[in-house]
Image: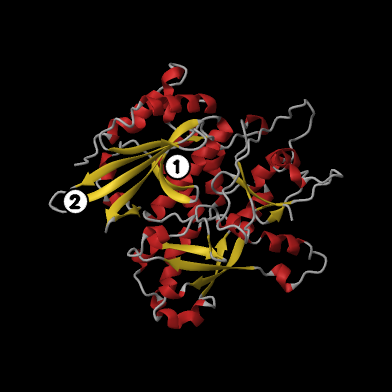
């Protein structure tokens, strides 16, 4: 659990540290107005086995604060490159991305600003990240490593 | 068991299903058909619309242009062209869209009219083909791509939130045995109040003093001027008086924190609050309201109108 103000401070530290920007398939990272949510995009190319056709995706990631659980929350959605335009792609089940997400992710579709996003459940965050009492100062750093960085840089992008 | 709880559980809504012409065989020539209800049904208040989707489509299948499996992930219901949030219990959406009707009906108690006894809810089924760009899908639309499993997962997530709000942790929810979560979900589908109460009572604190906070969501009524339904407000509601005064926390105590305009210069409460189709009183105990009127997702949903 992390208080809102502490979350905002640590999120900004991460944003300015360039950790996300340094991921090789990162297309952009931006802090949203208000300074309490961060949006990023990662290129992702899928070449299914037995299929010479590749699919080009852009994985849009949103990090925001869940006020109920008082934890950071990861949301994402997939855009597929199709006829020179990115189209929102809902059917996660039909993409190899699903096998690349951590198996312990509990994912639901819910609305953020009236648009559907895949949202990773946050209720077991303290068990996953480790209690904030242990090392409050690096809570967001640990969260970012476990929830995003350890799998996002493994996505094929060439 | 609380007798009001049983009455609320049995509450039903008369629904008229209209269907968008592009979904019907004959397309635009079916304009006439799309302007009249194709089905008249009755849904329990405390269930979710997608639970009836396959049944609705099966009853319509002779008139439908596409296969049912193709329609389900890309269809939605609307009221006055606004997407209905299927992830809320049916009764909550009804109360949001028909709050004016509920309020005016409450004035008919002395001399009931047909309108005050029979109320119907006209909703329309829409569909967007996959070939059309996803950007054209309306705001507020959540695709049902994983059928009932998606609905169940969404509902479980809501209960985890409610559990956290009440107990300060979701552990009770997460430690339910698989057979318990299955029977909890089945109790809703099978309209089994005893089964629902058996599991929910493990999550809901047994007494008023056991509540850390009360899971409540405020909704604003449907509004012609907005493009979609407003996101709900989730207030912080504790059942402990701040000023050492005795007596239960009443609705007015908590509502005015988020809606101070609901009281006029004479100190009179001037708004309406509706839950489970019932107009609430400012003096109602919040604990009693939650115990009697909680919805199937563990929240007490209150529609707040200042009209």
Q: Position of residue B237 (x, y in %)?
A: 65, 36
Q: Is residue B144 visible?
A: yes
Local packing at callout 1 (Cα closer than 10 Å; few below 14, some 14-19, many 20+) is: some
* Disc 2: which residue: A54
Foreground residue among B37 and B285: B37
Q: Residue at x 71, y 71 (%)?
A: B115
Residue farthest to the top? A134
Q: Secondary structure at mark 2?
A: loop
Local packing at callout 2 (Cα closer than 10 Å; few below 14, some 14-19, many 20+) is: few
Looking at the image, residue B22 sits to the left or right of residue B234; the answer is left
Identify the mark at residue B98; answer none if there is no mark. Answer: none
Q: Nearer the viewer, mark 1 or mark 2?
A: 2
Quarter of the figure with residue B143: bottom left
Identify the mark at residue B180; answer none if there is no mark. Answer: 1
Q: Secondary structure at mark 1?
A: helix
Is B120 rendered above or below residue A23?
A: below
Looking at the image, residue B300 sits to the left or right of residue B107; the answer is left
Is B213 rendered above or below residue B124?
A: above
Is A118 rendered above or below residue B13?
A: above
Q: Position of residue B44 (x, y in %)?
A: 56, 60
Q: CA distance from mark 1 to mark 2?
A: 43 Å
């Amino acid at each position: 659990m992390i208080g809102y103000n502490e979350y905002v401070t640590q999120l900004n530290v991460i944003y300015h540290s360039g950790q996300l920007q340094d991921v090789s398939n990162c297309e952009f990272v931006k802090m949203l107005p208000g300074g309490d949510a961060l949006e990023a995009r990662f290129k992702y190319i899928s070449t299914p086995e037995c299929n010479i056709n590749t699919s080009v995706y852009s994985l849009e990631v949103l990090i925001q604060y869940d006020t109920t659980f008082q934890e950071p929350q990861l949301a994402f959605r997939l855009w597929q490159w199709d006829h020179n335009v990115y189209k929102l792609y809902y059917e996660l089940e039909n993409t190899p991305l699903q096998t690349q997400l951590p198996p312990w992710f509990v994912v639901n579709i819910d609305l953020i600003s009236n648009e559907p996003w895949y949202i990773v459940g946050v209720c077991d965050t303290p068990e996953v990240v480790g209690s904030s009492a242990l090392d409050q100062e690096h809570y967001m750093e640990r969260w970012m490593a476990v929830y995003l960085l350890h799998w996002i840089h493994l996505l094929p992008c060439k | 068991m609380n007798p009001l709880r049983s009455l609320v559980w049995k509450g039903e809504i008369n629904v008229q299903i209209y269907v968008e012409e592009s979904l019907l065989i004959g397309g635009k020539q079916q304009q006439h058909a799309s302007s009249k209800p194709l089905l008249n049904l009755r849904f329990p208040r405390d269930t979710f619309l997608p639970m009836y989707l396959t049944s609705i489509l099966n009853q319509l299948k002779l008139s439908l242009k596409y296969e049912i499996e193709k329609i389900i992930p890309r269809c939605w219901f609307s009221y006055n062209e606004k997407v209905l949030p299927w992830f809320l219990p049916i009764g909550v959406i009804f109360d949001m869209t028909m709050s004016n009707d509920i309020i005016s009906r409450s004035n008919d108690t002395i001399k009931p009219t047909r309108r005050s006894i029979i109320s119907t809810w006209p909703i329309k089924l829409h569909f967007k083909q996959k070939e059309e760009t996803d950007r054209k899908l309306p705001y507020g639309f959540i695709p049902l791509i994983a059928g009932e499993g998606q609905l169940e997962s969404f509902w479980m997530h809501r209960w985890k939130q409610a559990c956290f709000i009440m107990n300060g942790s979701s552990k009770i929810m997460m430690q339910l045995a698989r057979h318990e979560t299955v029977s909890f979900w089945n109790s809703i589908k099978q309209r089994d109040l005893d089964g629902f109460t058996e599991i929910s009572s493990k999550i809901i604190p047994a007494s008023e003093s056991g509540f850390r906070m009360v899971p409540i969501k405020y909704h604003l009524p449907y509004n012609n001027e907005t493009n979609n339904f407003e996101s709900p407000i989730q207030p912080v509601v504790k059942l402990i008086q701040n000023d050492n005064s005795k007596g239960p926390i009443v609705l007015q105590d908590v509502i005015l924190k988020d809606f101070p305009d609901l009281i006029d210069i004479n100190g009179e409460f001037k708004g309406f609050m509706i839950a489970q189709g019932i107009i609430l009183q400012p003096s109602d105990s919040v604990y009693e309201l939650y115990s009697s009127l909680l919805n199937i997702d563990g929240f007490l949903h209150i529609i707040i109108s200042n009209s």
